[in-house]
Image (cartoon, helix red, strand yellow):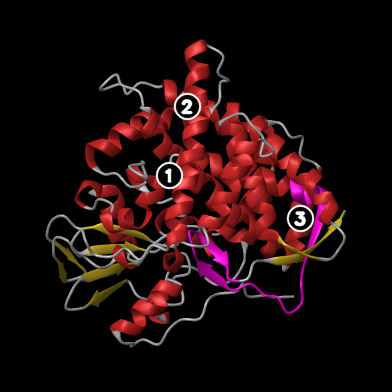
Amino acid sequence: MISRPPKPPSRPDKVSLWRYMRLFRKDILSAQPAKLYRAWMAEFRTPFFRSYLVNDPALIKKVLTQNPDAFPKSDRIGAGLRPLLGNSVFLTNGEDWKRQRRIIDPAFAGGRLHDTYPGICDAAAAGVARLAAKADDTPQEIEAITSHIAADVIFRTLFSIPIEDETAQEVFEAFRTYQRTQPILNLAAFVRGPAWMPRFFRSRTRSTARQIRTLITKLTQDRLDLIATGDAPDDLATKILTTKDPVTGQTFTLDEMVDQVAIFFLAGHETSASALAWALYLLATHPAWQEAVAQEAASFSGAFGDLSNLKQTRDVFRETLRLYPPVPMMVREATEAETFRGRQVRPGSQVVLSPWHLHRHTRLWDNPDGFDPSRWETENGKTCARDAYMPFSAGPRICSGAGFALIEGTVVLAHLLAHYAFAPVEGRDPVPVAHLTVRAEDGIWLRIAPR
Protein backbone atom coordinates (compact mmCIF):
# COMPACT_ATOMS: atom_id res chain seq x y z
CA MET A 1 0.00 0.00 0.00
CA ILE A 2 1.08 3.60 -0.58
CA SER A 3 2.36 5.21 2.61
CA ARG A 4 3.07 8.63 1.17
CA PRO A 5 0.25 10.44 -0.69
CA PRO A 6 1.22 11.71 -4.14
CA LYS A 7 2.77 15.13 -4.42
CA PRO A 8 3.71 16.94 -7.64
CA PRO A 9 7.40 17.31 -8.48
CA SER A 10 8.99 20.69 -7.79
CA ARG A 11 10.89 22.73 -10.36
CA PRO A 12 14.59 23.61 -9.94
CA ASP A 13 15.27 26.56 -7.64
CA LYS A 14 16.45 28.75 -10.50
CA VAL A 15 14.74 28.95 -13.87
CA SER A 16 14.31 31.71 -16.40
CA LEU A 17 11.24 33.94 -16.25
CA TRP A 18 10.07 32.53 -19.59
CA ARG A 19 10.33 28.93 -18.40
CA TYR A 20 8.62 29.79 -15.12
CA MET A 21 5.71 31.38 -16.97
CA ARG A 22 5.37 28.28 -19.17
CA LEU A 23 5.45 25.97 -16.14
CA PHE A 24 3.01 28.19 -14.27
CA ARG A 25 0.57 28.20 -17.14
CA LYS A 26 0.63 24.39 -17.23
CA ASP A 27 0.32 23.79 -13.47
CA ILE A 28 0.94 26.22 -10.63
CA LEU A 29 1.92 23.46 -8.15
CA SER A 30 4.83 21.87 -10.03
CA ALA A 31 5.95 25.34 -11.17
CA GLN A 32 7.11 26.13 -7.62
CA PRO A 33 10.51 25.22 -6.09
CA ALA A 34 10.80 22.71 -3.24
CA LYS A 35 12.20 25.37 -0.89
CA LEU A 36 8.72 26.85 -0.48
CA TYR A 37 7.81 23.89 1.75
CA ARG A 38 10.27 25.15 4.36
CA ALA A 39 10.51 28.90 3.67
CA TRP A 40 8.73 31.48 5.82
CA MET A 41 8.60 33.87 2.89
CA ALA A 42 9.86 33.97 -0.67
CA GLU A 43 10.21 37.00 -2.91
CA PHE A 44 9.70 36.69 -6.66
CA ARG A 45 11.17 39.69 -8.47
CA THR A 46 11.31 40.62 -12.14
CA PRO A 47 11.77 43.94 -13.95
CA PHE A 48 7.97 44.05 -14.34
CA PHE A 49 6.43 42.92 -11.06
CA ARG A 50 7.11 41.69 -7.54
CA SER A 51 5.29 39.15 -5.43
CA TYR A 52 5.79 37.55 -2.03
CA LEU A 53 4.70 34.06 -1.08
CA VAL A 54 4.05 34.07 2.66
CA ASN A 55 4.11 31.00 4.92
CA ASP A 56 4.86 32.76 8.21
CA PRO A 57 1.71 32.25 10.36
CA ALA A 58 2.13 35.68 11.96
CA LEU A 59 2.19 37.39 8.56
CA ILE A 60 -0.73 35.32 7.29
CA LYS A 61 -2.70 36.42 10.34
CA LYS A 62 -1.79 40.03 9.63
CA VAL A 63 -2.93 39.80 6.01
CA LEU A 64 -6.16 37.84 6.54
CA THR A 65 -7.29 38.74 10.06
CA GLN A 66 -5.60 41.76 11.61
CA ASN A 67 -5.56 44.17 8.67
CA PRO A 68 -7.53 42.61 5.80
CA ASP A 69 -8.65 45.95 4.33
CA ALA A 70 -5.02 46.77 3.57
CA PHE A 71 -4.70 43.52 1.60
CA PRO A 72 -7.74 43.24 -0.68
CA LYS A 73 -8.09 40.47 -3.20
CA SER A 74 -5.88 41.10 -6.17
CA ASP A 75 -7.79 42.08 -9.29
CA ARG A 76 -5.43 39.78 -11.14
CA ILE A 77 -7.69 37.02 -9.80
CA GLY A 78 -10.68 38.86 -11.22
CA ALA A 79 -8.94 39.09 -14.57
CA GLY A 80 -8.79 35.31 -14.68
CA LEU A 81 -12.25 34.41 -13.38
CA ARG A 82 -14.50 37.38 -14.08
CA PRO A 83 -15.94 35.96 -17.33
CA LEU A 84 -17.62 33.29 -15.22
CA LEU A 85 -18.01 34.90 -11.79
CA GLY A 86 -18.81 38.49 -12.77
CA ASN A 87 -18.91 40.69 -9.67
CA SER A 88 -19.44 37.86 -7.20
CA VAL A 89 -18.45 37.88 -3.55
CA PHE A 90 -15.34 35.86 -4.45
CA LEU A 91 -13.90 38.77 -6.44
CA THR A 92 -15.17 41.97 -4.86
CA ASN A 93 -13.51 44.15 -2.23
CA GLY A 94 -14.43 47.01 0.08
CA GLU A 95 -18.02 48.10 0.51
CA ASP A 96 -19.31 45.93 -2.37
CA TRP A 97 -17.93 42.82 -0.68
CA LYS A 98 -19.22 43.81 2.75
CA ARG A 99 -22.73 44.38 1.36
CA GLN A 100 -22.71 41.02 -0.40
CA ARG A 101 -21.56 39.18 2.73
CA ARG A 102 -24.31 40.84 4.81
CA ILE A 103 -26.87 39.33 2.45
CA ILE A 104 -25.23 35.92 1.94
CA ASP A 105 -24.01 35.02 5.43
CA PRO A 106 -27.46 34.54 7.06
CA ALA A 107 -28.19 31.72 4.59
CA PHE A 108 -25.27 29.72 6.03
CA ALA A 109 -25.82 30.48 9.71
CA GLY A 110 -26.01 27.56 12.13
CA GLY A 111 -29.78 27.15 12.06
CA ARG A 112 -29.87 27.16 8.27
CA LEU A 113 -27.36 24.31 8.13
CA HIS A 114 -29.97 22.14 9.81
CA ASP A 115 -32.42 23.12 7.06
CA THR A 116 -30.01 22.19 4.26
CA TYR A 117 -29.06 18.87 5.84
CA PRO A 118 -31.87 16.79 4.22
CA GLY A 119 -30.75 17.93 0.77
CA ILE A 120 -27.19 16.81 1.51
CA CYS A 121 -28.41 13.41 2.73
CA ASP A 122 -30.69 12.95 -0.28
CA ALA A 123 -27.85 13.70 -2.68
CA ALA A 124 -25.54 11.30 -0.83
CA ALA A 125 -28.18 8.55 -0.93
CA ALA A 126 -28.75 9.15 -4.64
CA GLY A 127 -25.01 8.87 -5.19
CA VAL A 128 -24.94 5.55 -3.36
CA ALA A 129 -27.74 4.25 -5.59
CA ARG A 130 -26.03 5.36 -8.81
CA LEU A 131 -22.78 3.75 -7.73
CA ALA A 132 -24.33 0.28 -7.58
CA ALA A 133 -23.89 -0.09 -11.34
CA LYS A 134 -20.16 0.68 -11.06
CA ALA A 135 -19.38 -1.45 -7.99
CA ASP A 136 -18.03 -4.43 -9.96
CA ASP A 137 -14.37 -4.22 -8.87
CA THR A 138 -13.29 -2.76 -12.21
CA PRO A 139 -11.35 0.55 -12.42
CA GLN A 140 -13.63 3.57 -12.12
CA GLU A 141 -12.77 7.27 -12.45
CA ILE A 142 -13.65 8.70 -9.04
CA GLU A 143 -13.55 12.43 -9.81
CA ALA A 144 -16.47 12.06 -12.21
CA ILE A 145 -18.43 10.25 -9.50
CA THR A 146 -17.76 12.80 -6.76
CA SER A 147 -18.44 15.68 -9.18
CA HIS A 148 -21.89 14.22 -9.84
CA ILE A 149 -22.66 13.89 -6.14
CA ALA A 150 -21.34 17.36 -5.25
CA ALA A 151 -23.34 18.96 -8.04
CA ASP A 152 -26.45 17.16 -6.81
CA VAL A 153 -25.86 18.58 -3.32
CA ILE A 154 -25.70 22.11 -4.72
CA PHE A 155 -28.85 21.81 -6.82
CA ARG A 156 -30.88 20.19 -4.02
CA THR A 157 -29.86 22.69 -1.34
CA LEU A 158 -29.75 25.81 -3.52
CA PHE A 159 -32.70 25.29 -5.88
CA SER A 160 -34.53 22.24 -4.47
CA ILE A 161 -34.02 20.28 -7.70
CA PRO A 162 -32.07 17.04 -8.20
CA ILE A 163 -29.22 16.70 -10.66
CA GLU A 164 -31.60 14.83 -12.99
CA ASP A 165 -33.43 18.10 -13.70
CA GLU A 166 -32.71 19.05 -17.32
CA THR A 167 -31.29 22.51 -16.63
CA ALA A 168 -29.29 21.23 -13.66
CA GLN A 169 -27.75 18.56 -15.87
CA GLU A 170 -26.80 21.15 -18.49
CA VAL A 171 -25.10 23.34 -15.86
CA PHE A 172 -23.23 20.33 -14.51
CA GLU A 173 -21.94 19.30 -17.93
CA ALA A 174 -20.88 22.87 -18.76
CA PHE A 175 -18.99 23.25 -15.47
CA ARG A 176 -17.23 19.95 -16.06
CA THR A 177 -15.96 21.34 -19.36
CA TYR A 178 -15.04 24.72 -17.87
CA GLN A 179 -12.94 23.41 -14.99
CA ARG A 180 -10.54 21.71 -17.40
CA THR A 181 -10.01 24.85 -19.49
CA GLN A 182 -9.28 27.55 -16.91
CA PRO A 183 -6.84 27.45 -13.94
CA ILE A 184 -7.80 29.05 -10.63
CA LEU A 185 -4.85 31.45 -11.21
CA ASN A 186 -3.59 32.57 -14.56
CA LEU A 187 -0.53 34.61 -15.38
CA ALA A 188 -2.48 37.81 -14.83
CA ALA A 189 -2.62 36.95 -11.15
CA PHE A 190 1.04 37.93 -10.93
CA VAL A 191 1.69 40.28 -13.82
CA ARG A 192 0.62 43.88 -13.41
CA GLY A 193 -0.28 45.40 -16.74
CA PRO A 194 -2.68 47.67 -18.63
CA ALA A 195 -6.30 46.80 -19.23
CA TRP A 196 -5.57 45.78 -22.82
CA MET A 197 -3.04 43.13 -21.75
CA PRO A 198 -4.14 39.68 -23.03
CA ARG A 199 -5.65 37.48 -20.35
CA PHE A 200 -4.84 34.17 -22.07
CA PHE A 201 -8.44 32.89 -22.20
CA ARG A 202 -9.15 29.97 -24.46
CA SER A 203 -12.17 30.51 -26.71
CA ARG A 204 -13.78 27.44 -25.15
CA THR A 205 -13.36 29.00 -21.70
CA ARG A 206 -15.25 32.12 -22.75
CA SER A 207 -18.04 30.27 -24.54
CA THR A 208 -18.55 27.81 -21.69
CA ALA A 209 -18.69 30.67 -19.17
CA ARG A 210 -21.41 32.33 -21.26
CA GLN A 211 -23.34 29.06 -21.45
CA ILE A 212 -23.17 28.54 -17.67
CA ARG A 213 -24.32 32.08 -16.91
CA THR A 214 -27.25 31.76 -19.34
CA LEU A 215 -28.42 28.59 -17.62
CA ILE A 216 -27.99 30.08 -14.14
CA THR A 217 -29.96 33.16 -15.23
CA LYS A 218 -32.89 30.92 -16.16
CA LEU A 219 -32.81 29.12 -12.80
CA THR A 220 -32.61 32.42 -10.92
CA GLN A 221 -35.41 34.10 -12.88
CA ASP A 222 -37.63 31.06 -12.36
CA ARG A 223 -37.01 31.34 -8.62
CA LEU A 224 -37.78 35.07 -8.58
CA ASP A 225 -41.07 34.29 -10.31
CA LEU A 226 -41.94 31.71 -7.63
CA ILE A 227 -41.02 34.18 -4.88
CA ALA A 228 -43.34 36.75 -6.45
CA THR A 229 -46.27 34.30 -6.35
CA GLY A 230 -45.45 33.01 -2.87
CA ASP A 231 -44.73 29.49 -4.14
CA ALA A 232 -40.95 29.35 -3.65
CA PRO A 233 -39.45 26.54 -1.55
CA ASP A 234 -37.51 27.55 1.56
CA ASP A 235 -34.04 26.75 0.26
CA LEU A 236 -30.76 28.65 -0.03
CA ALA A 237 -31.73 30.49 -3.23
CA THR A 238 -34.97 31.77 -1.71
CA LYS A 239 -33.22 32.77 1.51
CA ILE A 240 -30.53 34.75 -0.30
CA LEU A 241 -32.88 36.37 -2.81
CA THR A 242 -35.26 37.55 -0.08
CA THR A 243 -32.65 38.76 2.42
CA LYS A 244 -32.36 42.53 2.59
CA ASP A 245 -29.07 44.18 3.34
CA PRO A 246 -29.59 45.53 6.89
CA VAL A 247 -27.68 48.69 5.95
CA THR A 248 -29.20 49.62 2.57
CA GLY A 249 -32.47 47.66 2.72
CA GLN A 250 -31.83 46.32 -0.79
CA THR A 251 -31.87 42.73 -2.04
CA PHE A 252 -29.78 41.26 -4.83
CA THR A 253 -30.83 42.03 -8.37
CA LEU A 254 -31.14 39.23 -10.93
CA ASP A 255 -27.67 39.95 -12.34
CA GLU A 256 -26.11 40.09 -8.88
CA MET A 257 -27.67 36.78 -7.91
CA VAL A 258 -26.38 35.14 -11.08
CA ASP A 259 -22.88 36.19 -10.05
CA GLN A 260 -23.37 34.69 -6.59
CA VAL A 261 -24.84 31.41 -7.87
CA ALA A 262 -21.81 31.03 -10.14
CA ILE A 263 -19.44 31.23 -7.17
CA PHE A 264 -21.68 28.97 -5.05
CA PHE A 265 -21.37 26.37 -7.75
CA LEU A 266 -17.63 26.90 -8.13
CA ALA A 267 -16.99 26.92 -4.36
CA GLY A 268 -19.62 24.37 -3.44
CA HIS A 269 -19.31 21.94 -6.33
CA GLU A 270 -15.72 22.08 -7.59
CA THR A 271 -14.08 22.23 -4.18
CA SER A 272 -16.25 19.50 -2.66
CA ALA A 273 -15.83 17.22 -5.65
CA SER A 274 -12.05 17.61 -5.45
CA ALA A 275 -11.87 16.96 -1.71
CA LEU A 276 -14.20 13.95 -1.82
CA ALA A 277 -12.24 12.31 -4.64
CA TRP A 278 -8.93 12.71 -2.81
CA ALA A 279 -10.52 11.47 0.43
CA LEU A 280 -11.68 8.27 -1.25
CA TYR A 281 -8.23 7.77 -2.75
CA LEU A 282 -6.55 8.25 0.63
CA LEU A 283 -8.94 5.79 2.25
CA ALA A 284 -8.37 3.29 -0.54
CA THR A 285 -4.62 3.44 0.04
CA HIS A 286 -4.95 3.36 3.85
CA PRO A 287 -7.26 0.38 4.51
CA ALA A 288 -7.12 0.64 8.31
CA TRP A 289 -8.61 4.12 8.17
CA GLN A 290 -11.13 2.99 5.56
CA GLU A 291 -12.34 0.24 7.88
CA ALA A 292 -12.58 2.67 10.80
CA VAL A 293 -14.72 5.07 8.75
CA ALA A 294 -16.89 2.21 7.45
CA GLN A 295 -17.58 0.96 10.98
CA GLU A 296 -18.37 4.45 12.20
CA ALA A 297 -20.70 5.03 9.24
CA ALA A 298 -22.50 1.73 9.78
CA SER A 299 -23.55 2.80 13.27
CA PHE A 300 -24.51 6.36 12.32
CA SER A 301 -28.22 7.10 12.82
CA GLY A 302 -28.34 9.66 10.04
CA ALA A 303 -29.79 12.36 12.29
CA PHE A 304 -28.38 15.86 12.19
CA GLY A 305 -27.96 15.84 15.94
CA ASP A 306 -25.74 12.75 15.75
CA LEU A 307 -23.15 14.19 13.35
CA SER A 308 -20.71 14.44 16.25
CA ASN A 309 -20.57 10.63 16.23
CA LEU A 310 -18.79 10.75 12.85
CA LYS A 311 -15.58 11.97 14.45
CA GLN A 312 -13.11 9.78 12.55
CA THR A 313 -14.90 10.46 9.28
CA ARG A 314 -14.69 14.19 9.92
CA ASP A 315 -10.99 13.92 10.80
CA VAL A 316 -10.34 12.04 7.55
CA PHE A 317 -12.02 14.83 5.61
CA ARG A 318 -10.06 17.52 7.52
CA GLU A 319 -6.82 15.67 6.78
CA THR A 320 -7.75 15.45 3.11
CA LEU A 321 -8.29 19.22 3.04
CA ARG A 322 -4.84 19.63 4.57
CA LEU A 323 -3.05 17.47 1.99
CA TYR A 324 -5.14 18.54 -1.00
CA PRO A 325 -6.65 21.98 -0.30
CA PRO A 326 -9.07 22.51 -3.20
CA VAL A 327 -7.97 26.13 -3.71
CA PRO A 328 -4.17 25.88 -3.52
CA MET A 329 -3.27 29.58 -3.61
CA MET A 330 -4.86 32.94 -2.81
CA VAL A 331 -3.58 36.31 -4.01
CA ARG A 332 -3.88 39.60 -2.15
CA GLU A 333 -2.48 43.01 -3.09
CA ALA A 334 -0.72 45.37 -0.70
CA THR A 335 -2.33 48.81 -0.77
CA GLU A 336 0.18 50.46 1.56
CA ALA A 337 3.86 50.08 2.34
CA GLU A 338 4.64 47.18 4.68
CA THR A 339 7.65 45.41 6.10
CA PHE A 340 7.59 41.60 6.00
CA ARG A 341 10.47 39.84 7.73
CA GLY A 342 12.76 42.81 7.16
CA ARG A 343 11.82 43.27 3.52
CA GLN A 344 10.02 46.30 2.16
CA VAL A 345 6.72 45.41 0.51
CA ARG A 346 5.64 48.21 -1.78
CA PRO A 347 2.04 49.16 -2.56
CA GLY A 348 0.84 47.14 -5.53
CA SER A 349 2.92 44.10 -4.65
CA GLN A 350 1.19 40.74 -4.85
CA VAL A 351 0.99 38.75 -1.61
CA VAL A 352 0.48 35.05 -2.30
CA LEU A 353 -0.94 32.84 0.45
CA SER A 354 -0.57 29.17 -0.36
CA PRO A 355 -2.59 26.63 1.63
CA TRP A 356 -0.82 23.99 -0.46
CA HIS A 357 2.62 24.90 0.93
CA LEU A 358 1.45 26.02 4.36
CA HIS A 359 -0.34 22.72 4.98
CA ARG A 360 2.83 20.75 4.15
CA HIS A 361 5.34 23.11 5.75
CA THR A 362 8.22 21.09 7.15
CA ARG A 363 8.89 23.50 10.03
CA LEU A 364 5.30 23.54 11.21
CA TRP A 365 3.75 20.08 10.81
CA ASP A 366 4.81 16.69 12.11
CA ASN A 367 4.98 14.25 9.18
CA PRO A 368 3.77 16.99 6.81
CA ASP A 369 3.44 14.78 3.70
CA GLY A 370 1.85 11.83 5.48
CA PHE A 371 -1.83 10.93 5.77
CA ASP A 372 -2.61 10.85 9.50
CA PRO A 373 -6.15 11.87 10.55
CA SER A 374 -5.22 11.20 14.18
CA ARG A 375 -2.89 14.22 14.11
CA TRP A 376 -5.81 16.49 15.03
CA GLU A 377 -5.74 15.08 18.56
CA THR A 378 -2.02 15.78 19.04
CA GLU A 379 -0.56 19.00 20.40
CA ASN A 380 1.15 19.70 17.08
CA GLY A 381 -2.09 19.12 15.19
CA LYS A 382 -4.08 21.39 17.48
CA THR A 383 -1.49 24.16 17.19
CA CYS A 384 -1.29 23.90 13.41
CA ALA A 385 -5.08 23.75 13.12
CA ARG A 386 -5.12 27.18 14.72
CA ASP A 387 -2.09 28.75 13.05
CA ALA A 388 -1.35 26.91 9.79
CA TYR A 389 -4.58 25.46 8.39
CA MET A 390 -6.78 27.47 6.06
CA PRO A 391 -8.57 25.36 3.44
CA PHE A 392 -11.42 27.91 3.55
CA SER A 393 -9.19 31.00 3.99
CA ALA A 394 -9.42 32.83 7.33
CA GLY A 395 -10.53 36.06 8.96
CA PRO A 396 -13.45 38.12 7.65
CA ARG A 397 -13.10 36.56 4.18
CA ILE A 398 -13.37 32.98 5.38
CA CYS A 399 -15.70 31.04 3.08
CA SER A 400 -19.35 31.53 4.08
CA GLY A 401 -20.02 27.88 3.33
CA ALA A 402 -17.17 26.39 5.37
CA GLY A 403 -19.51 24.76 7.88
CA PHE A 404 -21.73 23.51 5.06
CA ALA A 405 -18.73 21.97 3.27
CA LEU A 406 -17.51 20.12 6.37
CA ILE A 407 -20.94 18.62 6.93
CA GLU A 408 -21.29 17.70 3.25
CA GLY A 409 -17.88 16.01 3.09
CA THR A 410 -18.45 14.05 6.29
CA VAL A 411 -21.96 12.92 5.37
CA VAL A 412 -21.14 11.91 1.78
CA LEU A 413 -18.08 9.92 2.91
CA ALA A 414 -20.16 8.16 5.56
CA HIS A 415 -22.85 7.19 3.05
CA LEU A 416 -20.34 5.88 0.51
CA LEU A 417 -18.18 3.93 2.98
CA ALA A 418 -21.21 2.38 4.65
CA HIS A 419 -22.09 0.67 1.34
CA TYR A 420 -18.87 0.27 -0.65
CA ALA A 421 -15.21 -0.66 -0.30
CA PHE A 422 -12.61 1.22 -2.35
CA ALA A 423 -9.23 -0.11 -3.51
CA PRO A 424 -6.41 1.46 -5.56
CA VAL A 425 -5.68 0.49 -9.16
CA GLU A 426 -2.12 -0.72 -9.58
CA GLY A 427 -0.01 1.53 -11.77
CA ARG A 428 -2.50 4.42 -11.77
CA ASP A 429 -1.29 6.67 -8.97
CA PRO A 430 -2.82 10.14 -9.41
CA VAL A 431 -0.63 13.21 -10.01
CA PRO A 432 -2.03 16.38 -8.40
CA VAL A 433 -2.38 19.43 -10.66
CA ALA A 434 -4.19 22.73 -10.21
CA HIS A 435 -7.03 23.46 -12.62
CA LEU A 436 -9.95 25.33 -11.09
CA THR A 437 -9.20 23.19 -8.05
CA VAL A 438 -6.57 20.61 -7.09
CA ARG A 439 -7.42 17.66 -9.28
CA ALA A 440 -5.53 14.66 -10.67
CA GLU A 441 -3.83 15.03 -14.03
CA ASP A 442 -5.42 11.87 -15.47
CA GLY A 443 -8.19 11.36 -12.94
CA ILE A 444 -8.33 9.25 -9.79
CA TRP A 445 -8.96 5.59 -10.55
CA LEU A 446 -10.22 3.16 -7.90
CA ARG A 447 -11.93 -0.22 -7.74
CA ILE A 448 -15.31 -0.27 -6.03
CA ALA A 449 -17.04 -3.28 -4.50
CA PRO A 450 -20.15 -3.69 -2.34
CA ARG A 451 -19.62 -4.23 1.38
Sooner in the amino-acid sequence: mark 3 or mark 2: 2
Residue positioned 77% across, 34% down in the render: 301
Say whether residue 10 is magenta.
Answer: no
Q: Nearer the viewer, residue 156 or 405?
A: 156
**Distance between the alpha carbons at the discs numbered 1 and 3:** 30 Å
Mark 2 is on which residue type? Answer: Gln
The residue indicated by pointer 3 is 292
Q: Identify the image quadrant of the N terminus.
A: bottom right
Q: Quadrant of residue 397?
A: top left
Q: Secondary structure at mark 2?
A: helix
Q: Give residue 399's mark.
A: 1
Dot 1: what SS? Answer: loop
Marking on residue 362 = none
Residue that sits furthest to the top in the current view: 229
Q: Is residue 382 above or below residue 129?
A: below
Q: Is residue 35 left or right of residue 147?
A: left
Which residue: 28% across, 52% down?
A: 73
Q: Is residue 77 visible?
A: yes
> Callout 1: few (<14), some (14-19), or many (20+) C-alpha neighbours within 10 Å?
some
Disc on the earlier residue, 2 or 1: 2
The answer to whether the residue labelled 3 contacts the one labelled 2, judged by CB atoms less than 8 Å apart, is no
Give the vertical position of 235 relative to 450 (above or below).
above
Q: Amino acid at mark 1?
A: Cys
Q: Which residue is mark 2?
A: 221
Which of 21/125 is in front? 21
Amino acid type, mark 3:
Ala
Which quadrant of the figure has residue 182? bottom left
State the image coordinates of residue 406 (x, y, percent, origin top left): 57, 45
In the picture, residue 188 is in which quadrant? bottom left
Read off the magenta span.
Answer: 415-441
> Does label 1 or label 3 sit earlier along the sequence?
3
